[in-house]
Image (cartoon, rainbow, N blue to C red):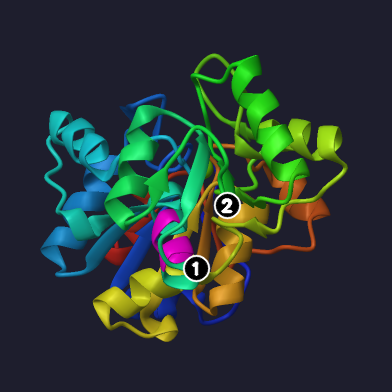
Amino acid sequence: MGDVVFLRDNSLEQLKQCKLFILDIDGTFYLSGKPFDGSKKFVDTLDSQGKKLVFLTNNSNRTIESYIEEFSKFGFNLSNDQILTAGVATAQYLFEEFGKKRVYIVGTDDIKTEFARAGHVVVEDDPEIVVVTFDKTLTYEKLKKATLFVSRGAIFVVTNPDLNCPSSEGPLPDSGAIASVIRKATGLYPNIVFGKPQPRLIEIVMKQNNIKPAETCMIGDRLYTDILAGIQAGVLTVLVLTGEATKEEIKRSPIKPDIIAHHIGEIAELLKNEL
Ligand SMILES: [Mg+2]
């Protein structure tokens, strides 16, 4: 252990002024559904200080309800507007951009439900759009269909660029890795890659809460998704060391957070002047 590292002079003052905290989930709030030691303290501290907390995950295979149900088991009661996933944001964005389309989804029934809810027609044949998600029910048949549809001209969309998802077993193949099979097989690159590091998800959350970038903090465990998204959205960035990034990686990377903490409990301690 050691101290929290501030890479910019006024970052502690800015942290205390933040009214909106956007938090990554995997590797930041919990690992494989098990919250870290400081997670409860972090949530309680934001609550007691009247600060807003929104979870933002690149995970694209689950419904919002499934997160609300899971979090309630830890004793955290989230409302619908306190969680946004790359899968749900992609469904909403594609509807706003293209209207009602025939969409083939490489994904679970949960994410198909979210696409239908956003207004799309989820189909098995002849789609106008192919969407690749973090599909734990992936089969060769799905890869084959997606490859044929993309090669015939369907718009190729990936919900999030992550190559793997951290778990207690180790890294699991995520949307980016699954999409790479279709990319190699077709020779075509995706037309749209959603999720962090695109700043759009953070911008959606700030807009929903009517809070400016100067009063917003993005906390995550990955430099090239969470922190880069935060930098591109113009908000304060905090990297935690409970997930993927290591101190060695921070030294090598051109992407630098404003603050480095061992875990989110330390951010709570900073907010309460206990550190
Ligand atoms: Mg993470």
- Which tag, 1 or 2, sits closer to the chain's start? 1
The image shows residue 172, relative to residue 87, as above or below, that is above
Cα distance between the residues tagged 1 and 2:
10 Å
**Badges 1 and 2: C-beta atoms under 8 Å apart?**
yes
Residue 46: x %, y % from top left: 21, 61
Q: Is residue 62 left or right of residue 184?
A: left
**Residue range highlighted in magenta:** 91-95
Task: Pick out the residue farthest to the right.
Answer: 187
Amino acid carrying mark 1 in the image: Phe
- For the point 83% across and 48% down, which residue is it? 188
Residue 145: x %, y % from top left: 64, 29
Q: Is residue 173 part of the magenta span, yes or no?
A: no
The local secondary structure at tag 1 comes to helix
Q: Which quadrant would the N terminus be assigned to in this image?
A: top right
From the image, tell me which residue sits under label 2: 128
Classify residue 255 by image quadrant. bottom right
Asked whether the viewer can see residue 275, the reply is: no
Mark sitting on residue 98: 1
Number of labelled discs? 2
Disc 2 Cβ-to-ligand 1 distance below 8 Å = no
Amino acid carrying mark 2 in the image: Glu
- For the point 27% across and 50% down, which residue is it? 117
The image shows residue 99, relative to residue 1, as above or below, that is below
Residue 36: x %, y % from top left: 35, 33
